[in-house]
Image (cartoon, grey):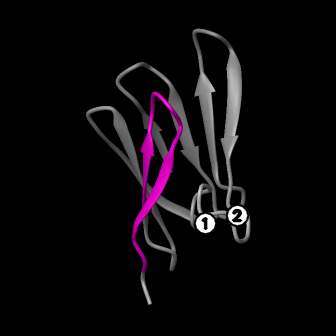
Amino acid sequence: MISEDPAGKIWIGTNDKGVNIWDRKANQLMYLSHTENNPNSISSNNIKAIAFDGGNALVGTFNAGLNIIEKNTGAVKNTCTIL
């Protein structure tokens, strides 16, 4: 899964390594991954969808719900968990 945000950053969702975010302007790579028992991390490393809504990235996972990532602060909120 590859998506480009409005700022031109490339978001790459992987099957087991979370999300890689490439800032082409700064030539920097950032990683978002799940950390067990950390509610501030994404809910899973198995990414199935990435979309953008205003200042947020919406990251859908396989069997671990939807995450909203605030692009300016990087804060993660798990909004919907699949049981």
The residue segment tinted magenta is: 67-81
For the point 45% across and 56% down, the residue is 77
Q: Report the front residue among 25 and 80.
A: 80
- Find out whether residue 75 is within the magenta segment: yes
Above or below 59: residue 73: above
In-front residue for pair 43/46: 43
Q: Which residue is mark 1?
A: 46
Q: Are marks 2 and 1 in contact (CB under 8 Å)?
A: yes
> Residue extending furthest left?
54
| Kind of residue at disc 1 | Asn
**Numbered circle sitting on residue 31:** none
Q: In the image, residue 6 lies at what x, y percent? A: 34, 24
Q: Nearer the viewer, residue 35 or 21?
A: 35
Measured as percent of width and height from the top left, residue 12 is found at 57, 43
User: Image point 42% across, 83% down: which residue?
Assistant: 82
Q: Which residue is mark 2?
A: 16
Residue in the image at 45% along x and 45% along y: 69
**Could you say which quadrant of the image residue 66 lies in?**
bottom left
